[in-house]
Amino acid sequence: MQRGDQQLAQGSFDGALDTFQQMLEKGANYWWVYTRIGQCLYYLMRYEEAVQAFQKANSLQEDASTLSWMGWAYLKRNDYAEAVRQFERSQSLNPSLARPNFEGMGAAYYWLGEYDKSIECSSKAFEAARTEDEKTQIRYDLGFTHAAKANYEQAYYFLGRRSTIGIWVRKGVQGFKVELVHKNGPADFAGIVPGDEIVEFEGQPLVEVDLRTFNTEMISKATYGSTVKLKILRGGTYQDKLVVIGVSPHLPKPAKAAGEEKMEPASSDRGHEVQPITPRVADSDASATLSPLDISSYEIKPSVVAPDGTFNIVVEFRAQDPERKSSEVSVSFTYKILSGETVMYEAPPIEMRVKAGQPMVHTEELLAPKEKRTYKVTVVLRNGNFTKTESKEFRIE
């Protein structure tokens, strides 16, 4: 047993697994041997086999620690309800396991979309945490649970200026396979979804980059509030995604997110709407005089908003194929919110296909921050190499 435990502690999980399996072959049919085998399989990400090993251990002797491990294995299998049951049973047998059990329950309730229960459990886990590493992980969990509820000030309280994009990944073929995306986190707003494979970071291929380097040398060392470009592979197609690093306390949230409690699939939908405008004068030669991109008008409605109140940014524009060859044009739209000269938030861009020369109106419905002050919203439209920007102020009173 001592040799297997040493291998396990040193991270030699394959070697430890062989050692403990040899013990079984020699007749050491004990519950704790199956528990160690389950732990090795868990670290090797063979979660289904890990559950089976923990179940076998539990059939020989019920043990609170084994039940807790089994809860984490169920959690990794995305069987969140069963994970909660195992954590609860473990906690009833041994209250001293409060930190791992409540941390696991907090994660399970998060992915079940029961955010208030998640916060309650994670808070208990934080109280029981003894090391700074444990507390750091639980702060992360609490931060993104509050972000899922669109409580960005509370999210910032726990996350601070931590450089994160809010995803769980594993090593894939060309880079890193996205397993989970935190709702209302940076990756979610950028339109990254589970199943995507991140293949480039700021132009650097990730095929030979390990998970530790990706997390600690790339994501964690990116500047808080900056925007990084990720190339993803989805359904055989490569796409570029711009992701804002970190969670801002002044993050404008989609109006549809207000009061939401149930989990939804990760989405880049920001509640935007694009509508054509019927021209007042029909002129077959009008498109010939259009520049590649024009902003006809830009308004913030209303310009004075109550904290957490709803407001719209409304942009009227026209775009033209510079070579006059296409009847449709791809226009990129984004915006950023500033307090003075400080950028509080920069939205990931969205791509729109519009009719060339056709007047269009783009509307985004947002919820105002809680802090009372004057803000400026700058909108940016791009058509190929052509860019147009406009800025307007609004007040929170």
Image (cartoon, rainbow, N blue to C red):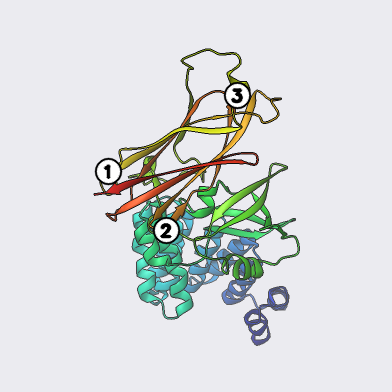
The answer to which image quadrant residue 176 occupies is bottom right
| Above or below, comparing residue 47 to residue 303 in the picture | below
Q: Secondary structure at mark 1?
A: strand
Is label 3 or label 2 in front? 3
Please state, as top left, top right, bottom left or bottom right, where the N terminus lies in the image: bottom right
> What's the amino acid at mark 1?
Val
Which dot marks residue 341? 2
- Which residue is under mark 1? 304
The mark that comes first in sequence, 3 or 2, is 3
Is label 1 or label 2 in front? 2
| Above or below, comparing residue 204 to residue 11 in the picture | above
Q: Secondary structure at mark 2?
A: loop
Is residue 345 visible to the viewer in this orientation of the structure?
A: yes
The mark that comes first in sequence, 1 or 2, is 1
Is residue 78 visible to the viewer in this orientation of the structure?
A: no
Residue at the spot 55% in from the left edge and 70% down from the top edge = 60
Residue at the spot 58% in from the left edge and 72% down from the top edge = 35
- Mark 1 neighbour class, 10 Å CA radius: few under 14, some 14 to 19, many 20 or more: some
- Tell me whether circle 3 and circle 2 mark residues in contact (CB < 8 Å): no
Between marks 3 and 2, how big is the CA–CA gap? Answer: 36 Å
Q: How many marks?
A: 3
Residue at the spot 28% in from the left edge and 44% down from the top edge = 305
> What's the amino acid at mark 2?
Glu
Which dot marks residue 289? 3
In-front residue for pair 242/78: 242
The mark that comes first in sequence, 3 or 1, is 3
Between marks 1 and 2, how big is the CA–CA gap? Answer: 20 Å
Give the percent coordinates (x, y) of residue 224. Answer: 50, 64
| Above or below, comparing residue 192 to residue 132 in the picture | above
Residue at the spot 27% in from the left edge and 54% down from the top edge = 372
Give the percent coordinates (x, y) of residue 173. Answer: 74, 56
